[in-house]
Amino acid sequence: MAANLDNDRLPADFPSPPSWADRLHPENLTIFLFHGVVEQSDYLVRNYNRKHLAAADFRAIMTALSERGSALSMDEVIAHHKNQTPYPEYAFAVTFDDSFENNLTVAAPILRELGIPATLYATTGFISNNRMSWVDRIEWAFEEKCRFDKAVEPDLPWQDTPVRAETAEEMRALLSDIRTKVKSGLISDPDAFATEIQVQLGLSETWTTPDPLDKKLTWDQIRELHDDPLFIIGGHSHSHAILSYLDESALANELDTSLRLLKDNTGIDPVHYAYPEGLPDTFSQGVIEALKDRGIVCCPTAISGYNTPETDLFHLKRFLVM
Ligand SMILES: [Zn+2]
C-alpha cells in the first residue's frame, strides 16, 4: 500500500489550465476563487482535491485569462457596481481565501509578472497563530499514517463502527466523506473533532506544520502584500467559523476580532470580506447586515456563476478553481 499515486497528473475532471479562459463571459464578470499555489505537490493523500494548484498550472491559467480578458481589482468591481457601468469585455477578478503563505511566495510573483491584481481574504486566527484549518489537520494526520504504511481507523460519530482506510485512495475517499459530513453542520466544534482524530490515530495534537500546504502568512507578509498596489486585503473571519451558524453575540465577536486584528496589525480597515465556505446556507441577511454595520461594502460567496453590475455586492458569485 501507500503506492505512489501519480500526483502530478491533474484529475480527469480538472479543466486544462488554458481552458479556464473559456469560463470568461463577454459582458459578465467572472470571479475566480483560489486557495493556494505550490511549487511541488508530492503527497500521498494530501491536496488530492487540488486546493493548492501547481505553480505551472496557475501560471498557465493566469496567462490564458490575461490574454483573453481584462483583470479587475475588487475595488474596481465595487466601482462598476456603484456606478452601474458595464465591465470591460471578458472581465475577471482573482481572489484567494484562507491566507496561505504560498499566496505571497509562489502566486504573487506570477501575478506581478502578468500585472494581474488580486484580493486576499485573510483569516486572522490562522495568521496570528500560523494555525491550520480543521480539515488540513485531519488531512495532515492521514498523510502521516499513509507515509509510514499505516492504516487509519477513526471512530466517527456518524458511523456505528470505526471505518478503516488502508490505501491512499481509501484515505482520500474517507477524507472526502468527513469533509462533506462536517461541512453539513454535523459536528458542532470541528477544531475539537480534528484534535480527537489526531489523538485517535496516535499522533500528537498538531495545529501547525512548516509544510507549504499549512503555513500561513505572517502579519509582516500581510503588510508586504498590502503595500503593493496590486493586492487588496480583505477579511475572512477570525476562526473560519460558518457565520450563519453563530448566534448574534458570537457573530459580533467573530467579525469584530477579525477586523480589530487586521487594524491593529496592519492598519487596514477593510471594505472587502468573504464568507467562510461561502455556500448558500453559510451566510444570511443577518450576517450581511452585521458586515454592513462594520463598514464592509463587498462580500463574495463561493457559489458558482457570473456577475452583472446589478448583482448585489454581498451575493457575488465565484468559480472555485481546484
Ligand atoms: Zn475559507
Image: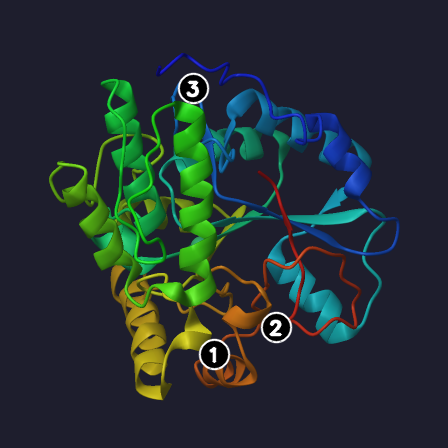
User: In the image, is 236 to the left or to the right of 210?
Assistant: right
Horizontal placement of 203 versus 117: left or right? left
Front residue of 187/92: it is 187
The residue positioned 51% from the left and 69% from the top of the image is 282
Q: Which residue is mark 3?
A: 40
| Residue 121 in view in this figure | no
Which label sits on residue 186? none
Question: Do labels 1 and 3 touch, CB within 8 Å?
Answer: no
Identify the residue shown where x is 65% and y is 32%: 62
Task: Say whether residue 7 is visible.
Answer: yes
Q: Residues within 10 Å of mark 2 (few under 14, many from 20)?
A: many
Asked whether the beta carbons under mark 2 and mark 1 sit within 8 Å of each other, the answer is: yes
Measured Cα–Cα span from mark 1 to mark 3: 37 Å
Q: Position of residue 169 (x, y in %)?
A: 45, 26
Please tell me the numbered disc located at residue 291: 1
Mark identifier at residue 314: 2
- Secondary structure, mark 1, is helix
- In the rendered structure, which disc, 2 or 1, sits on the residue that comes first in sequence? 1
Ligand 1 image position (quadrant): bottom left
User: Is there a contact, CB below 8 Å, between mark 3 and mark 2?
Assistant: no
Mark 1 or mark 3, whichever is nearer to me? 3
Q: Against 113, is 187 above or below?
A: below
Q: What residue is shown at x 80% (from left), y 64% (from top)? A: 308
Mark 2 and mark 1: Cα distance apart in space: 9 Å
**In the image, farthest residue toward the front:** 160
Please tell me in which quadrant of the rendered image residue 152 appears: top left
Q: Is mark 2 within 8 Å of ligand 1?
A: no
Instruction: Give the quarter of the figure containing the C terminus.
Output: top right
